[in-house]
Amino acid sequence: MAEFTMELNDEQKEVRDWLHGFAADVIRPAAAEWDEREETPWPVIQEAAKVGIYSLDFYAQQYFDPTGLGIPMAMEELFWGDAGIALSIVGTGLAAVGVLANGTEEQIGTWIPQMYGDVNDVKVAAFCSSEPDAGSDVASMRTRAVYDEAKDEWVLNGTKTWATNGGIAGVHVVVAVVDPGLGSKGHASFIVPPGTPGLSQGQKFKKHGIRASHTAEVVLEDVRVPGSCLLGGKEKLDERLARARERAAKGGERVKNAAMATFEASRPAVGAMAVGTARAAYEEALEYARTREQFGRPIIDNQGVAFQLADMRTQIDAARLLVWRASWMAVTGRKFENAEGSMSKLFASETAKKVTAQAIQILGGNGYTREYPVERMHRDAAIYTIFEGTSEIQRLVIARTLSGLPIR
Ligand SMILES: Cc1cc2nc3c(=O)[nH]c(=O)nc-3n(C[C@H](O)[C@H](O)[C@H](O)COP(=O)(O)OP(=O)(O)OC[C@H]3O[C@@H](n4cnc5c(N)ncnc54)[C@H](O)[C@@H]3O)c2cc1C
């Protein structure tokens, strides 16, 4: 009989406690400094590499946890430590997943180790899809990849924006248009190897939160990459484009569903990051409410404060359950018939924004200062409702899935 449990097993608890220790001892104490510096925390990434948290092996191990809880558990703990630093540690994973999802075995073996570097010389990688005029509307992408058959090279031109680690990465994974007639189905992904001429960093953004994570434009001017840098290879691309043209003629429904399934499976990880930030702020608020006294008693003695904490904790637990359900569905190959992945990201990210704002309120004046971490957590939390699909896009996906209608 199939077993059902909502408890982590001993091995999972061990990994969770180990990650929590790293988050508490290494990440959290460094958070305020790197937030102020607005720079990539290389020494912390190196520490993570030393202990085995910064490598493909570690994330693959979590990903293949048959319960599906490995990745959400890891994200929650690291982001509990600090969102900006944690994104600097896990951001390379975005590019690695791009290669894992579309690359050949040879490409995976060649490029993923280079993305992480080694303990003595850590590297980061970037995944570049968004453009100034193509955010939520991915189909409006303009960066063009043209095949130069004589040289077996692809030539990339365009401007990417909002790229996490963009310009400071060794390996960049760039999504570009290979067939403008096919919308998002005419896109392909390319590896741009370290030091390739023509790729440069544009503006580095000064951000509201997650300031320890580098975000920048990436400019591509006649960037030439070998044919072997097309992820999946030319033959597979030609077959895929032929199928997409055929399906486009019939309405294009099946291809759209395949792309959606990928997002459904990846969004819970962002939900788990949001749960980590929300939990961190809640814990700060709970501790403060227990110890801060006004009118001769701890402020938690007031229902107005205690009930806020009760709601915060309830929403965090509900968010985690949605994230765990969606992650379990992804790993066990369940179909996301109700857009459960998007639901988890929507609820967890909105919860993080709300809970971190309540935490500031509970800490009063102190909550509003940089002496306490909740104002940083609140600034950080705002990203979760924006990247990997905004809350509005999550609602659109959920509404379309539930109704079966092309709601606009
Ligand atoms: C810090 C940070 C890191 C990022 N990292 C990466 C990265 O590594 N790689 C990468 O490729 N991208 C990255 N992104 C980009 C991110 O995914 C986009 O910002 C996001 O998809 C939204 O696109 P946009 O900013 O262009 O907003 P827009 O799409 O212009 O949206 C603006 C507003 O309009 C709303 N809106 C748009 N369309 C609709 C609609 N149909 N219905 C209702 N409302 C709508 C949106 O919800 C939003 O509120 C990052 C962004 C940030 C801020």
Image (spheres, rainbow, N blue to C red):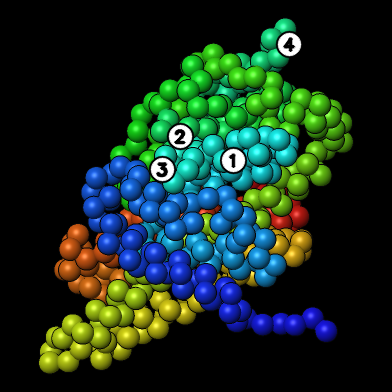
User: In the rendering, which numbered label is found on residue 169?
Assistant: 2
Q: Nearer the viewer, mark 2 or mark 3?
A: 3
Q: What residue is shown with label 3?
A: 120
> How many residues crowd around disc 1 within 10 Å: few (fewer than 14), some, or many (20 or more)?
many
Q: What residue is shown with label 1?
A: 112
Q: Quadrant of residue 234?
A: top right
Looking at the picture, how far across and down is residue 40, in whole percent? 34, 43
- If you read the primary sequence from the N terminus, does the residue marked by circle 4 or circle 3 appear first? 3
> How many residues crowd around disc 4 within 10 Å: few (fewer than 14), some, or many (20 or more)?
few
Q: Height in image: 4 above or below 301? A: above
Residue under the point 50% across and 71% down: 16
- Name the amino acid type tagged 1: Ile
Q: What residue is shown with label 4?
A: 149
Q: Quadrant of residue 269?
A: bottom right
Residue under the point 19% across and 59% down: 370
- If you read the primary sequence from the N terminus, does the residue marked by circle 2 or circle 4 appear first? 4
Res 164 seen here: no
Q: Which of marks 1 and 2 is in front?
A: 1
Residue under the point 58% across and 79% down: 10
- State yes or no: discs 2 and 3 in contact (Cβ < 8 Å): no
Give the CA distance from mark 1 to mark 2. 13 Å
Give the CA distance from mark 3 to mark 1. 17 Å
Give the CA distance from mark 4 to mark 1. 27 Å
Looking at the picture, how far across and down is residue 271, in whole percent? 52, 61
- If you read the primary sequence from the N terminus, does the residue marked by circle 4 or circle 1 appear first? 1
Q: What element carries label 4?
A: loop
- Name the amino acid type tagged 2: Ala
On the rendered structure, is 118 left or right of 46? right
- If you read the primary sequence from the N terminus, does the residue marked by circle 3 or circle 1 appear first? 1
- State yes or no: discs 2 and 4 in contact (Cβ < 8 Å): no
Give the CA distance from mark 2 to mark 3. 16 Å
- If you read the primary sequence from the N terminus, does the residue marked by circle 1 or circle 2 appear first? 1
